[in-house]
Amino acid sequence: MGYEWLPGLIAILRSVEEYEVLQALDNPHRWPRPMRDQRGNAFIAIWTRTNGGRPVIVTIRLIGGLDAQIVAARPMTPAETVQLEQWEQDHE
């Protein structure tokens, strides 16, 4: 799958570094969770970890074929991390 950045997103990333987003997307052990925004647009929230083990959520939008656009990225909340840890235990 090829990824492109939403224009301007790198400049406004907060609390997550560009390299962490790329590490998260490259992690083979990730939990893709379909979601929709308030307008009904479809996205995939990828719950995973960076190479250093930091739990993050990277949201992508499929743009055709095997390509996707990175539209958001943020660290997980403590409650989300608990959910991820449960999923990791169930999928080891």
Image (tube, grey):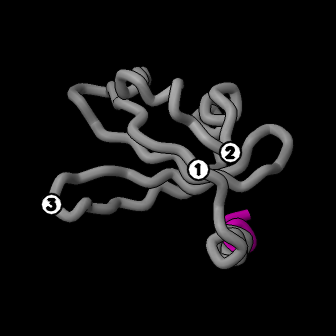
Alpha carbon distance from label 3 to label 2: 27 Å
**x, y percent for residue 11:** 52, 25
Alpha carbon distance from label 1 to label 3: 21 Å
State the residue at coordinates (41%, 24%): 8
Disc 1 target residue: 74
Residue span colored magenta: 88-92
Quadrant where the C terminus lies? Answer: bottom right
**x, y percent for residue 86:** 69, 77
Q: Secondary structure at mark 2?
A: loop
Q: Is residue 36 above or below residue 87?
A: above
Disc 2 target residue: 15
Image marks 1 and 2: residues in contact by CB distance under 8 Å: yes
State the residue at coordinates (72%, 73%): 78
- Which amino acid lies under the numbered mark 3 shown in the image of this protein? Gly
Q: Nearer the viewer, mark 1 or mark 2?
A: 2
Is 90 a magenta residue?
A: yes
Image marks 1 and 3: residues in contact by CB distance under 8 Å: no
21 or 30, which is in the foreground?
Answer: 21
Mark 1 and mark 2 lie on one chain; the one further toward the N terminus is 2
Is 3 a magenta residue?
A: no
Judge from the rendering whether residue 53 lies leftward or rightward of residue 10; answer left or right: right
